[in-house]
Amino acid sequence: MKLLIQGGRVIDPASGFDAVADVAIADGKIRSIGSVPADFAAQKTIDARGCVVAPGLVDLAVRLRDSGQPQEGRPSSELLAAVAGGVTSVVCPPDTAPVLDVPGLVEMLRYRSERQQLARVFPLGALTRALEGEVLTEMVALTKAGCVAFSQAEVPIANTQVLQRALQYASTFGYAVWLRPQEMHLGKGVVASGPLATRMGLSGVPVAAETIALHTIFELVRSTQARVHLCRISSAAGVALVKQAKADGLPVTCDVSINSLHLIDTDIGFFDSRTHLLPPLRQQRDRDALRQALADGTIDALVSDHTPVDDDAKALPFAQSEPGATGLELLLSLALKWAQQAGVALPQALATISSRPAAVLASSCKNLVPGLGTLAADQPADVCVFDPDADWVVQPEALRSRGKHTPFSGYALPARVRATVAGGQLAFEA
């Protein structure tokens, strides 16, 4: 299909391009930015006047809950939610049902998602069989099946020797390992430790659960030189350790979720299970440190941490409810809300959800699609067109995800997606 996106403010954080221009798309690629070739005959024209034309968003944490959990997120619904939110590339953790620990399951996930021609799906393979933390998976076979890196999702490895061997093996073959830093025994609570947890009578997760795990990971990275991406940093102390590790030259990157960037433990209110999240919401000083770290680049990327949860699993007492929240359709708006509050320029804010996560993905995967997270001629046409001045109120029932539970219900947010182009095809138009 030949598409013409006309009259929008084109922002490419990767190159620094920022100007009103036309974007011509043909054969799945961007043909030109600026003047339209004389021989270009568009089959469809998108009027982008007053809108921003940005690279398709890249989300590093999207649970599709593929097989075995049909009542929750499946590619058919969650990838529709992705493009409705301007997201054209998603990384899927391995904690599907069943776990992504054999090549056949990875191939099936990729096949089902590619058939829809919506957002690209980049699977993470399980680091250990069934995520049990005991036996390493066949990383070579999983990579050939399409895995871009390896992860334990939310399941920490209790045996440090197993983690060391996993990093040694990954380093030998040039694979990346994605880990959420959490010490297994200290991380069994349901809220962040502190006065609020004590008053509510809920089991707490101390900051030490994150920092102890980070110390362990960094020492193993020093000895193995494995590339590690740290998922969902949640504390000021964790940010300080990551900053020091980067200063020491360790090959590490990290991300933060939209939940931790905007919310704190007091947002739990009267045991609101929609705020039962992993990692748990921490105090305001932690949120402030996360915001600053995202702005200065210590934190590489902002993610939705999209986890669709059904009604029955959330309609339980707080401690027994299933953690997680939907976030795909909120990623862009919450990134821009943070930018407005923190005084961050629009191109810099867009970088946290496009070019910077794309760079994390590129450092993990040697055969990544070229041009991901950028707008450039002759590169794949993944484009998000949004109106920055169109405010909206989050209404869970209107979300396209099967998971309707979000702690941002009723929030007034900026920016609405008007169109999403994925792989040169118009995947969504409002």
Image (cartoon, helix red, strand yellow):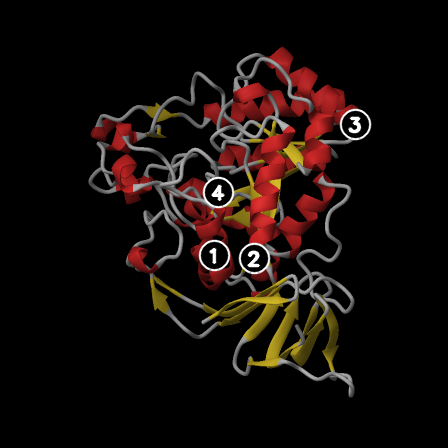
Where residue 87 appears, x then y in whole percent? 54, 57
> Image quadrant of residue 264?
top left
Question: Do labels 4 and 1 touch, CB within 8 Å?
Answer: no
| SS class, disc 4 | loop
Q: Position of residue 255 (x, y in %)?
A: 56, 42
Q: Which residue is mark 4?
A: 64
For label 1, the SS is helix
- Inspect the image, locate mark 4, and give the three-letter code of the amino acid beneath it: Leu
Residue 389 location (% of width, % of height): 44, 75
> Which numbered dot is residue 173?
3
N-term mark: 2 or 3: 2
Q: Position of residue 294 (x, y in %)?
A: 56, 49
- Quarter of the image that includes the N terminus: bottom right
The residue type indicated by label 3 comes to Phe
Residue neighbourhood size for the residue with mark 3, other residues' Cα within 10 Å, grouped as few (<14), some (14–19), many (≥20): few
- What residue sits right under mark 1 in the picture? 80
Mark 2 and mark 4 residues within 8 Å of each other at the beta carbon: no
Nearest to N terminus: mark 2 or mark 4: 4
